[in-house]
Image (tube, coloured by chain):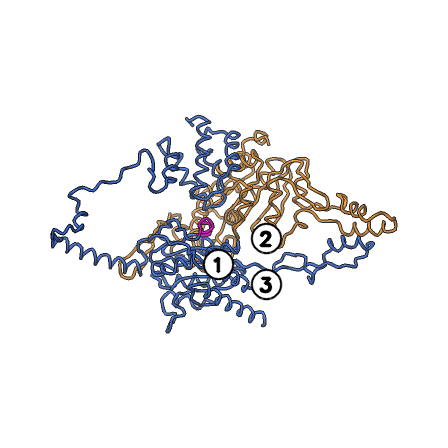
Amino acid sequence: MAESVAELSHRVLDFFALLREEHAFSTGQREAHDALRALDLLGVAERARVRAILRAVACSSPEQIEIFEDAYDEVFLAADEGAIQSMYAARHTRPGQESSPGAEAPVEERPGDPRDEDSDDGSGAGPTRERRLAEEQNEVLESWMALRARYSAAAAPAEPPTIAAAGLDSMETAVRKLLRSVHLGRSRRWTPQPHGVRFDVRRTLRASLQTGGDPVELHRLGPPRRAPRIVVLVDGSRSMSEHADTLLQFAYALGRATRRAHAYVFSTELHDLTRILQATRPGCELPNLGESWGGGTRIGASLANFVREHGARVLDDQTLVIIASDGLDAGDGQQLERAMREIRRRSAAVVWLNPHANSRGFTPSAAGMRSAVPFVDVLDAVHDARDVERVAERLAKGARRTQAR
Amino acid sequence: MNLTEFGDLPERFAERGYVVGDDFATALELMLALEKPLLLEGPAGVGKTESAKILADVMHTRLIRLQCYEGLDAASALYEWNYPKQLLRIRITENDGGDTLAREAEIFSEAFLLKRPLLEAITQERAPVLLIDEIDRADEAFEAFLLELLGEFQVSIPELGTVKAKTRPAVILTSNRSRELSDALRRRCLYHWIAYPEREREVEILRARLPEIDERLAEQIARFMEFLRAQPFEKVPGVAESLDWALALVRLHKSALDERTLELTHGCILKVQRDWELLQAQRLRYAPLLAGVELREQAPVEPDYGIGKVRARRG
């Protein structure tokens, strides 16, 4: 490498800060120290080796590796020597502040700019016939695009929603109730329990020292209850956009209540939201997730993708899967049926939250709902925390019925 | 740890029939240089466990293995008291008249301790390779319990105090990602993801492990495995299955794949009946592979409510 070791050290430190600040990596002082020590020990002669060293130290999951590769290319392979500094400075500039010395000035409006024509100066000069025609055409196009966006599988992505801050406390209470309502049997671990089924030799022996070696006080062990794992799959398509804030609040509250919660959003693509929700505060907007938000809906393809990419990690007999979607599917119904069968087979229960489920005259007749219903244990609506509590009660009743058998 | 002591790692691994890529070799070297645990993640059957065995062989040291499972606790992983021996000692000394504290100190001393893999690993004179296999199968509570060992290379035994490592073992943790590991554990480890090998690398692996294999057969197997891994199977075959299959074909004196051979030996690669049925339904698609013809990728066609055919965006 052409640059000096000191320069490389600075670049590595800046790069680690960038990963930490921009991508929520755990690249703190210890990791930076490890990286510099590793570069010192293993050498910096080969670019590929430097990359491998930094990757091994900075990353801790395959998702992070993907981000790392892009960020590394952007930073270390950029022709501009000051790439990191300028990028870092640009990203950390507050609104209204000058972004960087070389930043472009806002485009000045030209006197003859057609955008000025709308500013009515009272002169009576209205739009020309051609312009009116063009505007009408635009309106038609816009309404067509809106319709397409609502029902098509290939709609344009929209702005990501925020995690609703209002009512978070009651949502957290409801979520805790939901977690308590899921009964999945006992773990294989053994913990001290007064009425446990196994004899605790160690504690009994220690206690027996007080009674001359006679085990008068018996201690017991028992298996604790299994903590459920919850997977929430939120439909981020445009037809669900008005419910997105509440559903995100629900997923966020779950993530705060248990470490065993995973959240995903899908429309035409599937995106893992778990870590993003951990790093986002209520009331804040989520980062842009491409086509995962506000697009059309391919529920079957998205769920199949979920099973393939994440199923092995998050689906098992301790998992409660919650799918929040209106079931308006523009994809392959058979694929949805296959994916639902697989999810049901590999989980403890499936809950489908459809915002319209409690509407008068609702029948699960949408293409997606028809394919999914045979594999759903609970079908309900969620608009706020009270609805979550109702779902919890239904799950608890279901569990009691199962235990009574 | 002196890296030069073990020579060129990729070369040493290759001598033992394990093909290691540059990135993985760097991760292993880092683990030894920084004396930090290495977390290996990847699908089942890509050689995570095997790499630890080979490393121990390369380092001419012991491999101490802890197989994780649900319910694994400190008594099985770290240490356990020898209860029969303790009871016996209590009975023998019950009329000696010593005070309780002294007797307690005696029966909870090192002489009554049974070492389990983790304690065994940090009390060796020569640093061993400690393999903590399938950590994702253990409970989260056990993960938390490991933090002290992985961060400080010491363990605290309430009755004895802190036991510090005499020599720092080379620690490899493996995970199939059957659940998410905690950030605290990840932060204490270096990380490397082992993916399924690319076709050329798989041929290299087959030839390294089975030098007697026909070159054409190795190429065919690698192509076929590439095809299989793109299918939505319940159990996607890994390198371990690929090696099993290759060995079976070599033992059957096959020099090329054909439909009949696939039918007879599919149990080596597909472990779920539904996957086999799914594969049979795709006979037309994989037939060219058996004839040695490379497949051309077909663009998926998806409906779009009459707006037109839309191609799926490929990630």
- Distance from the alpha carbon under mark 2 to that under mark 1: 30 Å
As drawn, the residue found furthest toward the bottom would be A361
What residue do we see at 15% from left, 43% from top?
A: A112
Q: Disc 2 designates what residue?
A: B139
Q: Disc 1 designates what residue?
A: A169
A316 or B226, which is in the foreground?
Answer: A316
Q: Residue B193: x, y in percent? A: 49, 44
Q: Which chain is orange?
A: B
Q: Chain of mark 2?
A: B
Q: Chain of mark 1?
A: A
Q: Residue A153: x, y in percent? A: 32, 58
As drawn, the residue found furthest toward the front would be A122
A239 or B32, which is in the foreground?
Answer: A239
* Occupied quadrant, residue A85: top left
Range covered by the magenta-colored residues? A273-281
Amino acid type at image mark 2? Asp
- Whether A280 is among the magenta residues is yes
Q: Look at the picture and state if B128 lies above or below A308.
A: above
- Distance from the alpha carbon under mark 1 to that under mark 3: 29 Å
Amino acid type at image mark 1? Asp
